[in-house]
Image (cartoon, rainbow, N blue to C red):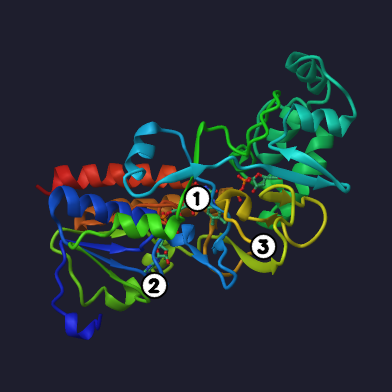
């Protein structure tokens, strides 16, 4: 669509970003309120960081890192199920430490193998780990968190260097919630996530989100940044912005830090390359993890693709950096964000709210925002 020709474009909603949040808001607004929605997306595809595509060998790859869908709440699962069929998502991750593979999250098998012990019960393992814990009066950061739960040996072999590589920051200087994302288990549950509802969209994420925005009231402009069109398109109801807040406010208070990744893909003529979908490398190599997504897409092929993730500080914003500096800075932006609601501009999503959110969580946020808009603009 040519922007100049559409100077007078007046959708009810202008939505910035065709990621999960943008697609959910558009779907609800078009279906429930019959509002016309224009989504502008600076990339050449929809689905945000969940985007997947088929490569030259016919294999589905996750372009921006592995996306393991899981749902904390059944009602969010039910909503997304309107747009896709599912296959099971039994994600298994291992960590390579001193040449051996160990289950991640840390579980009873990891503890037994690493310490070369056998425990008759979870309780026995807990008692053993209790002798290793380093007690802290106050858990101030990611280092304190793991030392106080698992002790020094596990911290140093499984967490410390992975975290330094992933964030370019020592765990002492990261909020405890960063490493706290991973469960710690004293049972033999081998799966990466705790949720029972763990599923993969049968035909992938791009297909799911394409289905979601099929409504005729929804238009999408790809390869179009908000900055390029904001003076030409004014929505009659509201703007939903899902990009980074510092960019929106032209870095008024300075830059928020984001962590980014380089993905290197390699396809081999092999049914399977590694024993599970993800292998983490805390201590060796420049990459953090190797992902063979075929383990969870369950495609049948003579080929398989593996991706290597190299963390970096510049590039597309993937992870908000949860430390003191950014939390102070974001609080300042948050005040501006709140004020923008008076101008009918709303911020939502992982980038816009500068929160380390999973897909089910941002979908829930988007549904909540839609309910708020629905009540406000009748
Ligand atoms: P995004 O998906 O980031 O979409 C925002 C869109 O807005 C982007 O397409 C962007 O190009 C566009 N945009 C931004 N600014 C502008 C602008 N100015 N103009 C036009 N367009 C703009 N979640 C899980 O549940 N499970 C996982 O296993 C998982 N793994 C992940 C692995 C990685 C490496 C990453 C980075 C994230 C992972 N996530 C995972 C999180 C998941 O990607 C996010 O929760 C989800 O994509 C957030 O949706 P969103 O709509 O808020 O933002
Ligand atoms: N982490 C770690 N070792 C691992 C896996 C994770 O130290 O083997 C830490 C690391 O700081 C990481 C955080 O836990 O950034 C969260 O891990 P998760 O696997 O949830 O990261 P994501 O999939 O979001 O990149």
- 68 vs 369, nearest the viewer: 68
Q: Is residue 366 left or right of residue 170?
A: left
Residue holding disc 3: 302
Q: CA distance from mark 1 to mark 3?
A: 51 Å
Q: Secondary structure at mark 1?
A: helix
**Which numbered circle lies on residue 328?**
1
Q: Secondary structure at mark 3?
A: loop
Q: Is residue 325 left or right of residue 311?
A: left
Q: Give percent across and percent down for residue 348.
A: 35, 52
- 2 vs 354, nearest the viewer: 2
Q: Quadrant of residue 191?
A: top right
- Residue contact between numbered discs 1 and 2, judged by CB atoms under 8 Å: no
Task: Determine the residue positioned at 76% across, 15% down.
Answer: 121
Q: CA distance from mark 2 to mark 3?
A: 35 Å
Q: Secondary structure at mark 2?
A: loop
Q: Earlier in the sequence, mark 1 or mark 2?
A: 2
């Amino acid at each position: 669509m040519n922007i100049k020709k559409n100077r007078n474009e007046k959708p009810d909603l202008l939505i910035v970003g065709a990621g999960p949040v943008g697609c959910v808001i558009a779907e609800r607004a078009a279906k429930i309120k019959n509002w016309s929605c224009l989504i502008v997306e600076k990339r050449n595809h929809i689905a945000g960081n969940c985007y997947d595509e088929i490569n030259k060998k016919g294999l589905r790859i996750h372009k921006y890192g592995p996306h393991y869908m899981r749902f904390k709440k059944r009602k969010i699962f039910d909503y997304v199920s309107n747009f896709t069929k599912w296959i099971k998502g039994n994600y298994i991750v291992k960590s390579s430490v001193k040449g051996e593979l160990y289950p991640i999250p840390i579980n009873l098998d990891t503890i037994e193998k690493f310490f070369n012990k056998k425990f008759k019960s979870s309780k026995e393992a807990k008692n053993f780990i209790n002798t290793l814990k380093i007690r802290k009066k106050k858990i101030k950061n990611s280092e304190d968190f793991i030392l106080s739960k698992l002790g020094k040996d596990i911290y140093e072999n499984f967490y410390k260097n992975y975290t330094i590589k992933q964030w370019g920051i020592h765990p002492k200087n990261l909020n405890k919630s960063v490493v706290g994302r991973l469960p710690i288990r004293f049972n033999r549950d081998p799966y990466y996530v705790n949720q029972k509802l763990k599923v993969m969209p049968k035909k992938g994420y791009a297909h799911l989100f394409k289905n979601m925005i099929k409504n005729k009231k929804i238009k999408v402009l790809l390869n179009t940044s908000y900055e390029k069109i904001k003076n030409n398109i004014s929505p009659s109801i509201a703007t939903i912005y899902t990009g980074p807040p510092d960019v929106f406010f032209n870095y008024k208070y300075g830059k928020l830090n984001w962590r980014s990744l380089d993905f290197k893909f390699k396809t081999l003529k092999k049914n399977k390359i590694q024993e599970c979908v993800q292998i983490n490398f805390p201590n060796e190599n420049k990459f953090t993890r190797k992902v063979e997504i075929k383990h969870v897409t369950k495609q049948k092929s003579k080929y398989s693709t593996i991706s290597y993730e190299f963390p970096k500080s510049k590039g597309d914003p993937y992870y908000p950096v949860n430390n003191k500096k950014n939390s102070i800075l974001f609080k300042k932006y948050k005040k501006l964000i709140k004020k923008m609601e008076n101008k009918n501009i709303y911020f939502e999503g992982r980038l816009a709210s500068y929160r380390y959110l999973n897909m089910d969580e941002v979908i829930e946020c988007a549904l909540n925002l839609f309910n708020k808009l629905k009540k406000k603009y009748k």
